[in-house]
Image: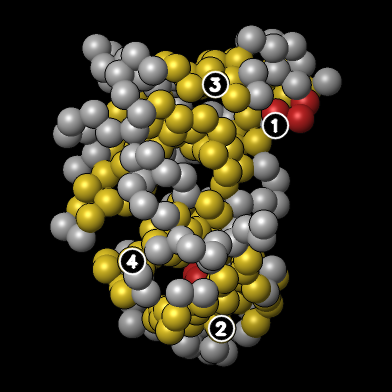
Amino acid sequence: GNSVTQMEGPVTLSEEAFLTINCTYTATGYPSLFWYVQYPGEGLQLLLKATKADDKGSNKGFEATYRKETTSFHLEKGSVQVSDSAVYFCATVGTANYGQNFVFGPGTRLSVLP
Amino acid sequence: DAGVIQSPRHEVTEMGQEVTLRCKPISGHNSLFWYRQTMMRGLELLIYFNNNVPIDDSGMPEDRFSAKMPNASFSTLKIQPSEPRDSAVYFCASSSGDLNTGELFFGEGSRLTVL
């Protein structure tokens, strides 16, 4: 079935540094790819998504491009802020006997220091 | 519009007690998921409902866990008897339609501590 692999971190950066969190996927076909973010004490929420190859998802200064040639969906931000400290999950949609489900990576904890 | 609502937010109980976690999905969503999150195992899918019917419960750890969805606006996850290893944050999430184009909406979670 479909799966995602992401760097597990933790990642610690200074404010205004450049961020990259790597994510690669294995999939049958070309399912949508997602980044979810979990702030402390909260549930996961959608950060951005891309539904087909070469699509770029973007939100809140974060970007990720769906690259089928490298099966990757790396998350990037040019200048991180303290408020970006959170856990980031790469995800895709899998197909099981019963239908669809979400497949999440293990999460990458990001800490941004002032 | 209200999001996914879970209760209780925090529960502390003693080993052997019954625990019931509750979830109200977003109105109109036809899929509901229960997840468990721990530091050791990350985010695990426990069970998935579609149109109130349990579709896949292969992630439910053992017979002590059960989940129901009596109607489109309510679901419960029950642990009986509870054990210390069940301590985790339990999330409920809901979605509508095709997951490839849709989005999974999470509640704020129920943090369970079993002493």
User: Which callout, 4 or 2, points at the residue further toward the start of the chain?
Assistant: 2
Amino acid type at mark 4: Asn
For label 2, the residue is B19
Callout 3: SS: strand
Residue pushed farthest right? A114
Residue neighbourhood size for the residue with mark 3, other residues' Cα within 10 Å, grouped as few (<14), some (14–19), many (≥20): some
Quarter of image, res A30:
top left
Q: CA distance from mark 3 to mark 2?
A: 40 Å
* 1 and 3 marks on the same chain: yes
What residue is shown at x 57% (from left), y 71% (from top)?
B24
**Above or below, comparing residue A50 to residue B75 in the picture:** above
* 4 and 2 marks on the same chain: yes
Mark 4 vs mark 1: in front = 4
Mark 4 vs mark 2: in front = 4
Query: Could you tell me which quadrant the C terminus of chain A lies in?
Result: top right
For label 4, the residue is B50
Label 2 marks a residue whose chain is: B
Q: Which mark is residue A15?
A: none
Disc 3 to disc 4: CB gap under 8 Å: no
What residue is shown at x 58% (from left), y 38% (from top)?
A37
For label 1, the residue is A85
What residue is shown at x 62% (from left), y 68% (from top)?
B6
Label 3 marks a residue whose chain is: A
Amino acid type at mark 3: Ser
User: Which callout, 1 or 3, points at the residue further toward the start of the chain?
Assistant: 3
Amino acid type at mark 2: Val
Q: CA distance from mark 3 to mark 4?
A: 30 Å
Mark 3 vs mark 2: in front = 3
The x, y position of residue A91, in whole percent, is 40, 37
